[in-house]
Image: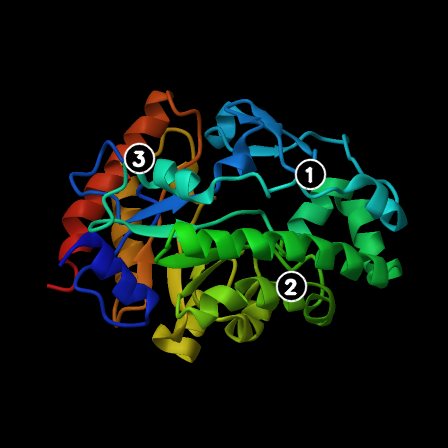
Amino acid sequence: MTEKENFMMFMRGEQPAWVPRYGMGQDPYSEYPPAVMTVTPEFINERRTPQGGFDIWGVEYVATAETGGMALPVPNKFILDDITRWRDVIKAPDISHIDWEAAARKSLANIDREQSAVVVRIHLGYFQTLMAFMGFTEGLCAMLEEPDEVLALFDYMCGFYTEVNKKCLEYFRPDFVELTDDTAAARNPFISADMYRRLVKPFHIAEMRPAVNAGLPVMKHNCGRCEDFIDDWFDIGVTAWNPAQVENDLDGIKKKYGNRLGLCGCWDTSGPVNWPGASEETVRQAVRDCIDRFAPGGGFCFRGGTLGPRDDPDTMNKRRWISEEYDSYGRTFYD
């Protein structure tokens, strides 16, 4: 059985032969090939650099070493200050000139599709992008005070994203798709379940419909304590969730939904592993504890890691220990 076949068993709610791992990428510390490779149409990231750059809507991002190169919008540099003026500011790029066949060929050129499942992920999400446009204060006020304008903006964005997704399904032929939208903070969601259902969920459903109709599983990315939305995710076609952070009642969720909702992650990103100078035994034991707790019965995919500068010896050691312990423990767990 290949890495891809084992991972896709998890995505379909079946019992994998070993604990799969998401987000391997080109992991230099693992002896196994990556189980998942993410592809995104090149034009989505053409204005991005390792230091940040701009997204397709004109929001400027900046990356930091402390986050391992991940980027966030430049603070207090918002492109939209009045939701009623979004039509003057937010312009979807023209994609009529794109050679999708060539774009897919280039993106997939170095991927072994026998070993690696290909996932298409094209944007940060409707809620999260609105916050990038306006900032949280104005963005949340817009959702409360001008819901019709927010709906109109999201409908415009959804039309664009859905067309991109259709092209990706046709030319990239992904094995599954990922829907991203970070609607929650560490303690609670940013918005109520009712607001999510009225203003965001309809566009999640619409954008994912072509993939669901094609029989593809959907991975939902949602950070924070977002368990309030899980029942709604099934209406979208979601079969797995990452990073399934420990702020949620993960034991209760696993008990309630079983393998209907695959848990990808369940890793304590703010715990002792991420403290400076964490010992090798602390890191390795955290890997074993995570697998022991969530892998029994299936429905679990390991996604452990640590943040920090990529060339920092402490960060590099932790990543190596995590990979090595996953290789030795997770891949033999079901034996």
The image position of residue 289, as x and y in percent, is: 29, 55
Q: Furthest residue to the left? A: 335
Marker disc for residue 203: 2
Give the class, few, some or many, for how many residues have Cα within 10 Å of label 2's Cα (few <14, many ≥20). many
Give the class, few, some or many, for how many residues have Cα within 10 Å of label 3's Cα (few <14, many ≥20). many
Give the residue number, with chain letter if any, for mark 1. 57
Q: Secondary structure at mark 1?
A: loop
| Lower sequence index among marks 2 and 3 | 2
| Lower sequence index among marks 1 and 3 | 1
Residue 198: name its quadrant: bottom right
- In this orientation, does residue 243 appear? no
Q: Is label 1 or label 3 in front? A: 1
Q: Please name the residue shown 89% across and 50% down the image.
A: 84
- In front of the other: 100 or 224: 100
- In front of the other: 290 or 50: 50
Q: Please name the residue shown 81% across and 39% down the image.
A: 89
Name the kind of residue labelled 3 in the image: Arg
Marker disc for residue 319: 3
Q: Please name the residue shown 58% across and 47% down the image.
A: 124
Q: Secondary structure at mark 2?
A: helix
Residue 228: name its quadrant: bottom right
Name the kind of residue labelled 2 in the image: Phe
Q: Is residue 189 left or right of residue 279?
A: right
Q: Is residue 238 left or right of residue 279?
A: right
Q: Furthest residue to the bottom? A: 256
> From the viewer's perspective, is residue 125 above or below residue 334?
above
The image position of residue 105, as x and y in percent, is: 35, 40
- In front of the other: 281 or 189: 189
| Lower sequence index among marks 2 and 1 | 1
> From the viewer's perspective, is residue 174 above or below residue 91?
below
Give the class, few, some or many, for how many residues have Cα within 10 Å of label 1's Cα (few <14, many ≥20). some
The image position of residue 207, as x and y in percent, is: 58, 62
